[in-house]
Structure formats: structure tokens, C-alpha cells
Image (tube, rainbow, N blue to C red):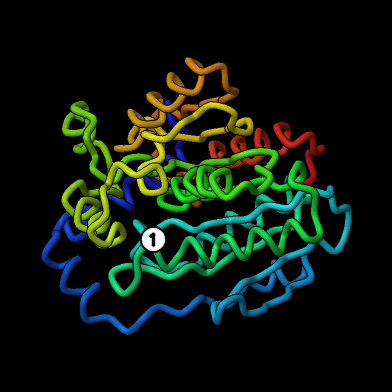
Amino acid sequence: MSSLRMSAAKFWLGLRKKYRSDPEAFRRTARTRAYPTVPALPRALHALTNVEERKVAGRAVFKLTPRQRASGWHLIYAHGGAYVNEFILPHWRIIESLIRHTGASVTVPIYPLAPEFTHRDAYPFLTEVYRQVLATTPATQVALCGDSAGGGLALGQTFHFRDLGLPLPGRLILFSPWLDLAMTNPGIPAIEPRDVMLSTARLLEAGQWWAGGDDLSLPTLSPIHGDLRGLPPIDVFQGTDDLFILDARELRGKVEAVGGSIRLYEYPGAFHVFVGATFTPEARDAFRKVAHGLGSSHRE
């Protein structure tokens, strides 16, 4: 069973499910919007870390370094939002919790979003960010991390970096990753009524924008179709009331079938990217497990 706090958060999110399920409203909003900006960092993050902002290929990149008890790990965090929606305050809260629990430095690349841009614009930018991180940190101490679309992007980057001959990161940390843009798993319709966050119709639209006419099954778009041999250890954190739970289970099976290392942590009744509700016991447990996986002591 989910905790009382998880149930309360899920109830509140469910109040806006109808709006989020309207593909026409989604299409109209995305096509007419002003391009998103990044919300200011919370005061707590400024107190916790030294914050550097720089430009890479004209785009903002933030680096947050713990002021005390740094662990030596460096996370590169890709935010979620169906490749369309902007970086929002809960993403900063996730990053704050990661730093408090792991002592890691975190680089946050603000990658270009659809429908204005596609994956073809994002990957060169993300590759340059990765190269710059490797210039100061051994690849074995780098973890690619992300939520939802950002989780899929973290895994997709691993395939891309391997193809370029770059050293692979030491670990992958995926929160509710979007692994198949085409949403092909036949079990998805049965789960959708329980999902208070996601709409298949809107996801399919967003996925087409992000692909920009390319085949949705490309591993850099839908990493569940990639060659999963030789990947770094993967930790996946997933709620059971989430459209993406089925693909997460399929990913586990495929990685294990080729001898890879993957741990899938399922949280009963938890919603999509539940770690954004950092006040819930489930989210706190997930962050503790991330710290354990990185060999970091509990620091909260």
C-alpha cells in the first residue's frame, strides 16, 4: 500500500487529470507558447551548494557542488516533461534531495525542447556537456540521471556516447523513465485509468514532435529498443500506478537477458515521477537507495 502522503498527493494530482488528457489543449498551448525559462533556484540549494551557471552552445548549464562532504560523484541530470514541458521547481527539489543524500555534484543541462526543437538539436549539446564533465571527472564517477523523458534521455545518451567511442558513465539512475515513444505495450490501456499524471494521446503527440520525422524506434528516442549489452549498472525507480511501469519491467528483463546489471524498485500505488513529491516516505526511500547504490553514506 502507498503511504498517506502519497495517497494525498495522488488525489490532488488527479483533480487536473481531465485537462492533462486533452490533446487539443496540449497542442494549442505548445504551439502558441513563449519558449520556457528556468525557475530560480530555491534558497535551500544556494545554501547547500556552490552554483555555477555557464553557456554551452548558447544554452544554460548549471553545476551545483556541495559546500560540504562532497562524495566525488558527479550526476548529469536531464529533466522530464515529455520533451516539451519546461524545467520546473519540483526538478530542483529532486536535485536538492539527490545532493543531500549522495553528496554528489550535479550538472543540469537545459536541453532544447519540442516542438521548437527535436532530438537532433539536443544530442550534440548534451554530448558537449558530457565531454566537459569528463574533462574534470573520471567516467566511472559520473552517473547519468533523469526523470520521465529525462530518464529515457539518460539511457539514450549512453547508446549515443558508446557509438561516439566516449567512455560510458559509471551508473544510470532512472526515475519513471519514458522508454518507448510509440507507447506500444498492449497493457498500457489497462493502467491508464490509474495514472493521474500521464495521457497516452498527449505523449504520442509529444513523441512525434521530439522525433522530428525520424523513426520512433531509434534507440536514442526509444531506448528500450537499443542494444543493452555492456551498459553501466542501472537503477530504476518506478510507481505501479504509472503508464511506464510495463516498459520498466520489460527493460529489466531485457537487461538481465544479456547479462547486465539492473535493479527495478517498484513502489505500490505511486504515481509518475513520485520522487518529485520529496515529502513522501516513498521518495525518501528512493533517494536513500540511490545513495546506497553510489556507495554514499546517508547524508540527509
Q: Is residue 188 visible?
A: yes
- Would you say 160 lies left or right of 35 here? right
Task: Give the image location of residue 280, x and y in percent.
Answer: 53, 43
Q: Is residue 44 above or below residue 252?
A: below
Q: Which residue is mark 1?
A: 119
Q: How many marks?
A: 1
The image quadrant of residue 117 is: bottom left
Q: Is residue 95 above or below residue 250?
A: below
Task: Give the image location of residue 277, x and y in percent.
Answer: 50, 50
Q: Is residue 7 visible?
A: no
The image quadrant of residue 51 is: bottom right
Q: Is residue 251 above or below residue 198?
A: above
Residue appearing at x 25%, y 36% in the figure? 194
Crowd rating for badge 1 (residues with CA inside 10 Å; few <14, some 14–19, many 20+) = many
Q: Given the image, on which type of amino acid does mark 1 rest? A: His
Residue appearing at x 46%, y 79% in the figure? 37
- Would you say 137 lies left or right of 157 here? right
Residue appearing at x 49%, y 29% in the figure? 228
Residue appearing at x 78%, y 39% in the figure? 298
The image quadrant of residue 33 is: bottom left
- Would you say 81 lies left or right of 74 here? left
Residue at the right extreme?
A: 69
- Would you say 137 lies left or right of 24 here? right
Image quarter of the N terminus:
top left
Task: Give the image location of residue 102, x and y in percent.
Answer: 75, 45
Q: Is residue 4 above or below residue 47?
A: above
Task: Give the image location of residue 21, x and y in percent.
Answer: 17, 54
Residue at the left extreme?
A: 24
Q: Nearer the viewer, residue 252 or 2?
A: 252
Q: Callout 1: helix, strand or loop?
A: helix
